[in-house]
Each structure stands twice: as C-alpha cells, then as structure tokens.
C-alpha cells in the first residue's frame, strides 16, 4: 500500500484558522502562553488501559499538552502499567501528573514527603496542588507549590471546591491566582469537576453566562495562565467563542481531544467562523 504523505490535505483544510501551528510544541511552563494561537489542552484520564492510552496518544497526542491521572487513580494501577503510561506521555512531550485530590489525601494522611518522593521516582513531571476537598491555609498551599518546584516538577494549581453549589468568588480567585503565580505555579485551573455541573463557574445545567466569564477575565487581566475546566462540549464552545482558540481548556475527556482541536481550528460548525476564509467557497461549473 502506498504511504500517504503527512500533509496530504490542503493547508486551508488542515487549519482554516491559520493559527494552530503544531510544528513545535512549546514547553508547558511560563513562556508557553506567549505562543500565539497555541491554547493548551489538558485531558483527564480516569482509568485508561495500556492500549487505550497508546491509541489516544497515537491519534491525538499532537493536540494534547497535559494529561492528569484523575483523583486518586494513580496508586491503583499496576506499577508496570503506570510506568508505561508516564513514559509514553513524556516521550510525546506531554506534562503528566497525578490528580490534585491525591496530594490532598497525602496532606490528610501526613505523608507529603513520601508523595513527592514517589511521584518523582515514578517519573511524573508535573503535580497539581489543590484544596477542592480539604482546607489549606495560604501558607501551606505556598509550601506545597514550592515543594513541587524543589523536586523539579512543573506545578499546576487549582482554585475551587468540589462540593456541589460551590461557585467561584471572583475576588478570591484573583487573590489565589496571583499568590500561586508568585509562589511559582505555572498555571491556575478553575475547578469544574469531571461533571461540569453545579460547581465553579457552571450552574446545575452546566451553563455559565458569558458576562460572568468576561468579569473573571477582566478581574484577572491576563487569562493566558488560566486553565478553564470544561468537560462538556457546550462549555468548550462557550469558552472558545468568548476567548478564542488560544484559551486553555482542561478536564477534556480522552475521546473528545481530537474533536476539541477541530473546534479550535474552525473545522466544526460550532466555531466555523474561526476559519480565515470569510466568503463561501465558489465552485466553477
């Protein structure tokens, strides 16, 4: 069978927006947000097996920047499988980290040093610091961020509680984000859980007024280091239409990673207007 060239499709069909240059993957860290049109995608893995994980990266690895092994799933994998997944993600240039709830459990169980030692020994290159279930003082949150950095890990933090009905307090979000960045965190995630309903920015129907998003953006001033958890397609569309293709979106289901990239490029009806061509295609008869 004749091999098909990688760039078999016309550039105008591969990326109508003309902004999603994937030829080189910038580092996830502090300078990555300066790359125009290179919004980050974080996928949540709630228990993919070896083949499903490999298939995900083969199919959509080029459009993913970070994989989070959700909640406390990381300790439940057979060690050889966990090592395989971490190594494969890193080979693809991805940030891979255990879920923030696992670090919260380590705080609760008073085994934080063992948590960081194990995460590094296994090969994780990132860590999430959160207090969605427990309470952390500002001092303790800063200590955990700095402990992650000391271990050579890229630190992502998360703002918000997981309890249903816990909505975003904009002033508190801004204060937390600024303190996290000052402590060395590279990105701050706004909580929405994996359900995307009745928590964070979203009501029990998974909806959020655009005016609220704009108020959050205005208060933060710069959203290039904010990761918005948007597990539902309608939420992804809302954020893309509000902030554009460069917005950072998290808690994306593995099966939706490629579909999200089509929306970023204007290859789906929801964001078709992202395409650079504004006039209809004309056909010669």
Image: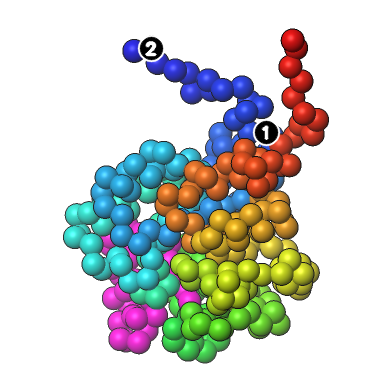
Q: Is residue 135 left or right of residue 124?
A: right
Q: Is residue 235 left or right of residue 285?
A: left
For the N terminus, the image quarter is: top left
What are the residue bounds of the magenta stretch? 103-131
Say if the magenta span includes residue 168. Answer: no
**Disc 2, disc 1: CB below 8 Å?**
no
Q: Taking the image as drawn, is residue 285 in sight?
A: yes
Q: Is residue 253 above or below residue 15?
A: below
Say if the magenta span includes residue 109. Answer: yes
Q: Which residue is mark 2?
A: 2
Q: Which residue is mark 1?
A: 16
- Measured as percent of width and height from the top left, residue 3 is found at 40, 16
How crowded is the residue under tag 1: few (<14 C-alpha within 10 Å), some, or many (20+)? many
Q: Which mark is residue 246?
A: none
Q: Tally the marks.
A: 2
Cα separation, mark 2 vs mark 1, equals 27 Å
């Amino acid at each position: 069978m004749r091999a098909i060239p990688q760039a078999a499709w016309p550039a105008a069909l591969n990326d109508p927006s003309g902004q999603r240059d994937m030829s080189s993957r910038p580092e996830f860290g502090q300078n990555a947000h300066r790359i125009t049109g290179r919004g980050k995608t974080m996928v949540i893995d709630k228990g993919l097996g070896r083949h499903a994980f490999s298939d995900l990266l083969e199919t959509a690895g080029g459009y993913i920047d970070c994989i989070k092994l959700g909640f406390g799933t990381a300790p439940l994998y057979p060690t050889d499988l966990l090592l395989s997944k971490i190594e494969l993600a890193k080979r693809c240039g991805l940030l891979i980290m255990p879920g923030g709830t696992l670090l919260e459990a380590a705080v609760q169980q008073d085994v934080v040093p063992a948590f960081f030692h194990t995460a590094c020994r296994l090969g994780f290159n990132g860590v999430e610091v959160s207090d969605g279930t427990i309470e952390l003082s500002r001092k303790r949150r800063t200590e955990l961020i700095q402990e992650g950095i000391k271990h050579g890990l890229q630190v992502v933090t998360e703002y918000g509680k997981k309890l249903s009905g816990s909505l975003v307090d904009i002033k508190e979000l801004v204060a937390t984000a600024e303190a996290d960045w000052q402590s060395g965190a590279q990105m701050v995630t706004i909580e929405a859980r994996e359900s995307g309903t009745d928590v964070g920015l979203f009501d029990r129907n998974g909806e959020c007024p655009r005016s609220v998003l704009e108020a959050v953006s205005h208060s933060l001033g710069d959203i290039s280091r904010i990761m918005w958890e948007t597990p539902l397609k309608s939420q992804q569309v809302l954020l893309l239409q509000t902030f554009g293709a460069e917005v950072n979106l998290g808690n994306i289901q593995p099966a939706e990673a490629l579909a999200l990239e089509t929306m970023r490029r204007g290859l789906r009806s929801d964001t078709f207007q992202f395409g650079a061509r504004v006039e209809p295609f004309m056909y010669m008869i």
